[in-house]
Image (cartoon, grey):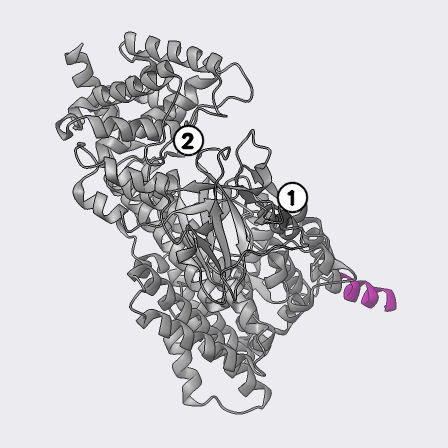
Amino acid sequence: MPGFFLHLSEVLFFVLDCVGVNTWVVERRRDTFLHREAMWNVRFQLEGDDNTTYHFGSQSEGTTTPGLQSDTDMLITLNDWNIMYSMADWQQGKANFLMVRYADTPPQHYMLQLYRPNLPLPVTHMHHPDFVTDSQGRVFLSNMLMVRVAAAEWGDAHLRRGPSNSDREDMDYVYALKCKTLPSEIMSWFTKMGQAYWPSQETFEAAKKCVCFLVPDGYHGSVNKNTEWRITPNLIERLLMFSLNIVQIKCLVVLKIIKQQEFVKYIHHTNCKFTTFHCKTALFFTLERTPPTLWTKCRLIECIVKCLQTILEFLNQGECPHFIVEGVDLFDGKLCRKCQLSLEQALQGMIQDDMHVLFHLQSDDLGQRLMLLPHEVRPYPGDNVNAAVCGKLARDMFDMYLQNVTDVCYMLCNSEEPELCISLDNGITMLENLAINLSATHYHKHFIKLMVKYLTSIKASVKSSGSIQSAQPHPQDIWQLYGESLNTDVASSKLKLASMHYCRGELRRAESVLNEVEFDLDDSVQPVCGCRDIVKDNLSKSFCEYTVQNYSHEQLTKKLAFCVRFLREEKLCAPQFLWCEMYRAVGDDVDHRKRAERYWMDWAEVDARPFLLYLQYLTYRGLGVRHRQLEAFHGLEDMVTASDKIHQFHHPETVINLFGHCCELEGNVYRALEAYNASLHVQPRNNAANLHKQRLELMLNTI
């Protein structure tokens, strides 16, 4: 039915636009994840780790929708080790591993034999849990070392899925080794290409410059499963994905949604799985065989059918070849023959039924949207889905930025330098040197610029704290540092400036800065924090709408409010009540900190909005402006007593503690004690409320 397919193609194309599959959002996704890669890689260089991070998969490719709930995939290469395809790759002074295959080694897999760092000779003895020695004295690297390291790091939170390890359901970390030379089964792909419709010659030439990786994933039925490493050409695959046009991307997304919707009906064996990678492989082979003229908006349904026919071809022959790696069957270990036949029957039925299955797709309400008349389908970018996707991408990117900032701050605080200012100067110098490095991309430079500004803000506060301690006036260089760092975001650096003025007794200056923050901190400002993921979906609607049209780092920071952080070296620039947050551990509390909490729980951390109100309360109390003081008190009270508000904060226990202190200053000791108990209900351990509660109970007992 060509006419029906033509009309349905145009409606489906438009509907996919509305659920985040459009050129505009795809570019946002890719840009976001390339920035996140750069963040990690800059941090690794600062810490002296020879690692490189890459983002792969649906999120970074832009081939997903909110309804697909795709994981985020991160591959981290360990570059300290030299992976040799032949002895010509051996390097002096490195841990060298030779890629070894035997006659019975499964396709796409290698074992890594350890060679000496001083001579190109194999190691013959090694007593270590990360190595396995065979009967001939050959020493092989175990792929279980990644599992062991991850389990030690994450403890009970450790999750293992194939080659990936994680401490959360929506994130997959794969630790991999980078091959020095492309192996023959990948090189053969370059020799067979050239006459196909796709990829283009430009993409093909770029692919030749890509490296490949070995991931710790043994063959499912192998006796050497724990010493086998699987070869994977992720960078080539990402290059191919980035070369797709929007019609091809939409086609793949629909295949994924069909797979998600229908596969439980025809997969009977619990160990069988028809995967997203099968869909991607089918698209690649279909693109290779079909002219570019097919891949147009009005022929989208025809493109989907062509891909389904490619899958049917694989099912009919009982084998799904890898598009790049020679000799691999992607059905092996994934889809038994019985399930292949069931899937074949289901896909044939879809095609014979003129793809009416599309009207029954539940993901992202795609089926319902298809049945609406075109004028009833909301267009992008005004569609709420597109705005929500952009808002989440922006928020998550800056969450990741703050996580990396936290790790860098921890590293600088624990350096061997005698003073934090020296460590901060060293860190800033290293960042500036990285920025001028010829290999630094604009993604690296954006992150470096933000990081330098953030560290400068800390340096200003540390130096100011020193001046306050010595009761000396601030020299000009401190004011210059504050000036250089005021726009890290819309609020946090300015709130630290206001706090410094308050601690110096400059209440009118503090008031002026607080009024400026209050004006800027409107409903379109989104709070972000790199410490915790308390609430995943508390995105401001107005912030999401703002990100639709404004997505540069400079524009976004005008609508982001970071949590306010005071290191111990900055404490004289923080209200004295907050000092207890820096020493919140009581008894064995430190032993009960989660992995991410090890870094920031020795600092004071508080959400920007409640800290603004707290500073206003203190400042107007000092100025004797009672009505403004009460406004701030009741604003903070509203945040604490409204259950729908308190749990939206990243540090709710600290917010409640601040309110408790205001109650104390109001002379209401019993309400303050009630507040500290409420804070402990939210966070029983590692909470300064324990100290405040003990102090008040001791005071009440002595009355």
In percent of width and height, residue 495 lies at: 47, 69
- Is disc 1 placed on a helix, strand or loop? loop
- Is disc 2 placed on a helix, strand or loop? helix
Task: Tell me which residue sits at (43%, 49%) in the image.
Answer: 396
In percent of width and height, residue 251 lies at: 28, 27
The stretch of residues the image draws in magenta is 693-703
Amino acid type, callout 1: Ser
In percent of width and height, residue 618 lies at: 57, 70
The answer to which of 121 and 368 lies nearer the viewer is 121
Q: Which residue is mark 2?
A: 68
- Locate residue 390: give its quadrant: top left
Mark 2 → mark 1, Cα distance in angstroms: 48 Å
Number of numbered callouts drawn: 2
- Locate residue 8: give its quadrant: top left
Nearer mark to the viewer, of 2 and 1: 1
Q: Residue furthest front?
A: 136
